[in-house]
Image: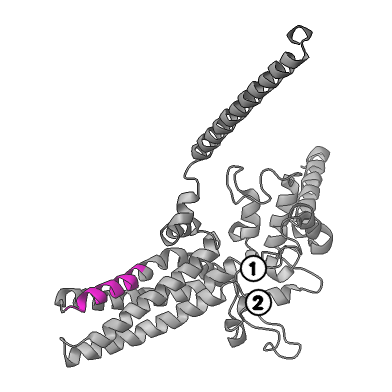
Amino acid sequence: MKTPLNIMCAYVLMLFATTATAMSTEKIDFESQIKPIFNKYCLECHGEENEEAFRIDVNSDMLLYVNEGHPETSDLYNYMTLEEDDDNLMPPVDHEPRPKSSEIQLVSAWIAQGAKVDGADSADAGSALASGDSGADSGAGAAAEPISPETQRMFNALGSLHTAAIHLPIGLLLGAGLFALLSLGGSFVMSDCAYYCLWLGTLGAIFAVASGLFYSPMEHRGTVNSIADLLDQTQPVFWHRLGGIISTVAALLLCMFAKAARGRNPDDGTMWKLCAIALAAAIGWVGHTGGELTYGKDHYKDLNELVDTFINPAEGNSTPKADGSDTKGSDTKDSDTKDSDTDDNTDAGETEIEIDSVEGTFSTPTDI
């Protein structure tokens, strides 16, 4: 037989369970609950002043860092939960005020519910961007289907390999050009090295280009949803991406041409070797543009200064090599100045003495 106390405890437990369920299923409103958090902690650095950078106030930009339904794989949430000594912590550790734990958990719950947004930039627009459908191609009034979280995670994993995959084909194709140059004198060993480096570098370049198409949206450098996007020069990654695609296609055609040329006459391969040298120069330029995207346009400033010293040796010699050289030079100049001042003062003193002695000679009554 149930006692009143047991019945009361059962009702209390049922009340707690019902309340917890209601809180977990309560829909989180983006405009009133999530957007104020972003405006308070993120808008200062990621607002309208950063036209070419990540914009937290543009929902389509913000949703690129959100994996709907999975906060644990969403960069937007992960950046907010990093350790304080991590450079990627958002907002930075020196930013005041700091977000509260309850606010971070609210962002997590919002992502878990599907990261729905309201306003001009809707969740459908963000999903269409992620799924590769533009507004013009989606049909009249038809909403594009968002890709599944599993597919998005696969795309992100493929894109994350781009930075590691790009170095191998660059090195191999540069090596192919170098070996082709050395083989022009008739070395069969160098010719074989150039040929196989060309093939291996081309295969690696194909994978690097494919992974780069998924990497650039992750870094907010531009997406390719149509031919118009591919030709959009306003995207930061435009020249790097276009150069990589063209160089990869040219490398694949050159592989076939080199194979046919070696099949006809192994001793005659001057044309494809010259093309391999030109391809190496193009790959070097593609790598340079990628370095500018990652490290900035001044990442070769030390090398440029060194080159300038060889081009303009006079200007290079006049430039101080160390901080101490200026100090020593200035000390020497100061000492020279002091010496000259001393000499001037000495001469002036002697002149004054002579004048005084002369004046004293003619003004003294006893001398008259």
Q: In which quarter of the image is residue 137?
A: bottom right
- Residue sitting farthest toward the bottom: 264
Residue 3 coordinates in the image, percent (x, y)? 80, 39
Q: Which of marks 1 and 2 is nearer the N terminus?
A: 1
Mark 2 belongs to which amino acid?
A: Leu
Residue 20 coordinates in the image, percent (x, y)? 76, 51
Residue located beneath label 2 in the image: 129
Closer-to-camera residue (289/31): 289
Mark 1 belongs to which amino acid?
A: Leu
At a point 82% along the width and 71% down the height, the residue shown is 119
Q: Which colour scheme is used?
A: one colour
Left or right of 76 on screen, residue 159: left
Distance between the alpha carbons at the discs numbered 1 and 2: 8 Å
Q: Residues within 10 Å of mark 2 (few under 14, many from 20)?
A: many
**Would residue 203 be seen by someone viewing this image from the given angle?**
no
Left or right of 127 on screen, residue 291: left
Closer-to-camera residue (157/238): 238
SS of the residue under disc 1: helix
SS of the residue under disc 2: helix
Q: Which quarter of the figure is the N terminus placed in?
A: top right
Q: Are marks 1 and 2 in contact (CB under 8 Å)?
A: yes
Residue 341 coordinates in the image, percent (x, y)? 62, 29
Residue 23 coordinates in the image, percent (x, y)? 78, 54
Residue located beneath label 1 in the image: 64
Left or right of 142 on screen, residue 275: left
Closer-to-camera residue (187/162): 187
Question: Which stretch appears magenta?
Answer: 171-185
